[in-house]
Image (cartoon, rainbow, N blue to C red):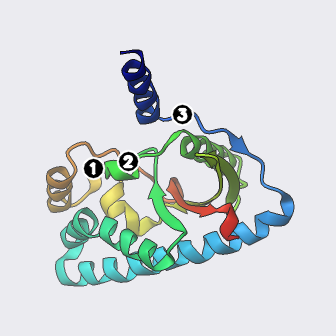
Amino acid sequence: MRKILFLFILLAVGACGLKEKEIKVPQEEVGKVAAIGEKATKKLMAELKSNLGKAIREGGMPGAIEFCAGKAQELAQKVNRELVVVRVSRVSDKYRNPKNKPDSLDMKVIRMFKEKLRKGSLPPYYVTAVERGGKLYYVYYKPIRVAPFCLQCHGNPEEMDPEVLKVLREKYPEDKALNYKAGDLRGVFKVVIPADKI
């Protein structure tokens, strides 16, 4: 009985997730991590922009929302299969898709970027490291800013096209990704790289 109880406690702790300790990255590794992170980020950005542009041409802004709701995650998975060991994703504190919800480290970095942006000195990226299951991983973060064009789907709902708002509410009933202004921090690209692959 004790063994079963101990196993249950271990499983419960594992399911809840242990707090990851952030590890300082040696300066000589930062450039290498940033180069890999930037390459992965550009690959995902290019795929998203290309497919989003096509969706807009074919179905307007409602078509763009349909693409984001149905295909953006699949596209990220495709890019990750091509990258093999590196994993790239997008996360935000004001997420639209729950799959883009940040973990505690993501939130720490997002808050840091927001504070830097508020002070007028947003860095182009941030590199850190964490240990998971006895293995070291580098994590590259790149800020995502809100462009004026993005406000058609992420701006003030009172100023948005009613058809766009209707589709957003249908696809994302728990939507948090509204009321942005141009230049705001929308979220981050996150690239996770096993340290032994550097």
Residue 20 lies, with reference to residue 51, above or below; the image says above
Q: Earlier in the sequence, mark 2 or mark 3?
A: 3
Q: Element under label 3?
A: loop
Residue at image coords 37%, 60%: 151
Q: CA–CA distance between discs 2 and 3?
A: 33 Å
Amino acid type of the residue tagged 1 in the rendering: Pro
Residue 185 lies, with reference to residue 17, above or below; the image says below
Q: Element under label 1?
A: helix
Residue 122 visible in the current orientation: no
Provide the residue designation for mark 3.
18
Q: Position of residue 185 (x, y in %)?
A: 53, 53
Amino acid type of the residue tagged 2 in the rendering: Asn
Residue 64 visible in the current orientation: yes
Q: Element under label 2?
A: loop
Image mark for residue 116 = none
Q: Nearer the viewer, mark 2 or mark 3?
A: 3
**Circle 3 residues within 10 Å: few <14, some 14–19, many ≥20:** few
Q: Position of residue 62 (x, y in %)?
A: 19, 68
Q: Is residue 76 left or right of residue 175?
A: right
Amino acid type of the residue tagged 3 in the rendering: Leu
Q: Earlier in the sequence, mark 3 or mark 1?
A: 3
Q: Position of residue 184 (x, y in %)?
A: 52, 54
- Which of 34 and 3 lies nearest the eye of the viewer? 3
Provide the residue designation for mark 2.
179
Residue at image coords 34%, 73%: 75
Provide the residue designation for mark 1.
157
Q: CA–CA distance between discs 3 and 1?
A: 38 Å
Whether pointer 1 and pointer 2 mark residues with C-beta atoms closer than 8 Å, the reply is yes
